[in-house]
Image (cartoon, grey):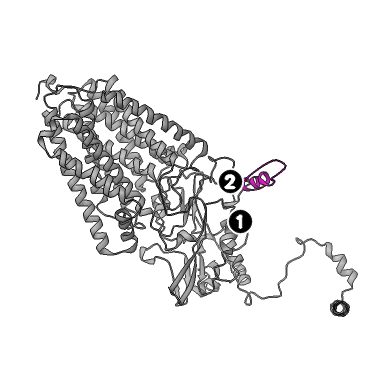
Amino acid sequence: MNIKRFLYGLAGLALLIGAWGLYDRFVFGHANTNYGSYVVWGLWVAMYLFFAGVAAGSFMISTLDFLFRIPIFKGTGRIALWTALVSLAAGLTSIGLDLGHMERIWKVFLEGNPSSVMFQMVWGYTLFGLLMLICLFLAIRMPESRLLRVLMGIGLVLSLFVSGAVGALLGVQAARPFWHVGLFPVQFPVFSLASGTAVMLSVLAFFGPKGDPNRRQQFWVLGILSVALVLVKLYFIWADYSVSIYGNVPQNVNAVREVLFGPYWWAFWILQLLIGSLIPVVVLSQKKLVQRPMLIGWMGVCLLIGYAVARGLIIFPALTIPEIENLANAFGGPHLTFEYFPSLVEWAVTIGTIGMATMGVLVGGDFLPLYLQSHKKGKV
Amino acid sequence: MKKRKTEDLSRRDFLKITGAAVSFLGALELAPEKVLASADTSLETRPLKFDVSPEDDQILRMQSDLRRALAKPVEERRWVMVIDLRKCLGCHACTIACVVENKLPPGVVYRPVIIEELGTYPNVAMRFLPRPCMQCDEPPCVPVCPVNATYKDENGVVVIDYDQCIGCRYCVTACPYGARTFDFGDLYTDETAESEGIIFGKPSASAYERSASYEYGETRQRNDHTSSPIGNVRKCHFCLHRLKEGMLPACTTTCIGRATYFGDANDQDSLVADLIASPNVMRLKEELGTQPRVYYLT
């Protein structure tokens, strides 16, 4: 079966499920969600972090073509830019639906508080999105223009800033020792680059034009980059968790335990480490396997699953530890619990946003001139 | 025989009470008909008199302190709350009073009482920790708000502008005390059965739930899931709307153990100023530098 047709079908189904989620969200508000006043951010926030990371990372990959002009990546810039745009749209959809009053989002622009990291992030992503649109336009119409190169340079700095801002959004929170990590703003751009690399592996493997002589080399470089970034990410996790456990601050240690041995153990050990890290590292580090694009594509998907789960495991565990012991039992009521597993509506909306991003990449690839064969440009 | 005794006692009691009342009125040089005639005098025209002095009852003293504070310019006041953990009974009256006063929906709580069991059996003790918003002088929840919807008002109380809040809940994650909750739009009558002519009550109960709350002196009805405060973060505000009218916060007046105190710490004659000067005062998570305005006596 043709992978594209299969993914079209899957994305269509995901959009249908997402439509039901949207209906519930708009008719009943937040009533049918499982996040609450204690675990205050749930799946939608985690997916926003994930998609925003993919967007920043894809943009970084597109600079290999349009800014750094690396020959083997010639022709990959447009689809990388488009993937970044589509991911950003999916991320903003996810976070928009999470807001209590999404109709007031304009207030961030006109009546905002510039000293808030969230304000900086919203402004940053807005500018980033606009810049990506202009870059894509230029990349299609005037790929050799100097303006494109200048904008890509600005965009690269902006992509580092916005992905770093997501890290800072969590890192500034002294109330949550699990998040209060000074290096978060440094770690998050690395995570973003890793996500962007993974998504490009999948996109190029599944949809890239056949017969491109550079494809295998692209897979090899992106694969090795992925392996390196996975190892860096694992090192960050090891450093964070081991220091936290050694430091023995109860709120922090409990959050780490929640990840390793708590209700999310399977997400960490199976999805993030086994499927999202170990298997792709083994496969992608073998050069002979780069001749099998489907395998490479699915390894990209595995990596993305791992990164999405990792975002969730940054968000939820910190919130499942009470700020004050026994707070959970002090007063009962809906949404007053420190236990969290996403509700059907949350899953439906998330499936919808994934479907939206997938459909966006597919439709863009079919109707926009996004794929170029690098050898046609003759600068290999 | 037993019944007869009861009747005798009643008759005797009646005579005693009547005699005492006539004597009392006589002493006051008031005839009973004069007392009855004055009964229609409205409360507004008759000043309230307390035979108990403010020194005898802490509520009266705090009300007196409050009146004095309200006469001062707002920037000279420093509202603080003091909670004596040794006197707290864990009755949750303050929690309920707060829910009623602010018409809080399910899942929204401003002042839970945290129950802790200390020690191991048989050497155990219970400790109750009421936890309102700390109204921090360095509130971590304020600078993170992307739209300035939460801020310290002129009273020094951390408030939320419901019409400005976008419901991102960043402030909730920033609060080290878990003092903020999100209004998901729930109603107590949501799951209530309803059947015309068989099960009554839901329409009127639901109407009551949807009727206006007067937090911050505003009138807000819970009409649908999009009207604020639904979709907003909510928190304790020291009952600002009551303070404005010269009344103590609801949790303070309803505390049956007289464990909660409220007043102006800048007034050296106030009860709270006396209390926070004692050596057995502590504040929650002081190491975070939040400078809470809620003090605990231990």
Residue A154 seen in the current view: no
Q: Report the amino acid beneath label 1.
A: Val
Residue appearing at x 49%, y 36% in the figure: A24
Q: Is residue B140 above or below residue A128?
A: below
Q: Position of residue B211 (x, y in %)?
A: 63, 46
Q: Is tag 1's residue or tag 2's residue first in the polypeptide sequence?
A: 1
Residue beneath disc 1? B100
Residue plotted at (47% across, 54% down)? B180
Q: Is residue B109 left or right of residue A53?
A: right
- State which region is magenta: B192-212
Q: Position of residue B104 (x, y in %)?
A: 57, 52
Task: For marks 1 and 2, give the CA distance.
Answer: 20 Å
| On screen, residue A158 above or below A37 | above
- Measured as percent of width and height from the top left, residue B282 is found at 43, 71
Find residue A301 and report its image quarter: top left
- Left or right: A66 as drawn, with respect to A329: left
At which x and y percent is residue A146? Answer: 18, 27
Q: Is residue B288 above or below residue B55?
A: above
Whether residue B273 is in magenta: the answer is no
Question: Which residue is more in the foreground, A357 or B279?
Answer: A357
**Is the same chain shared between marks 1 and 2?**
yes
Circles 1 and 2 in contact, beta carbons < 8 Å:
no
- The answer to whether residue A144 shows anywhere in this view is yes
At label 2, the amino acid type is: Glu
Subunit of label 1: B
Q: Nearer the viewer, residue B71 or A342?
A: A342
**Which residue corresponds to mark 2?**
B191
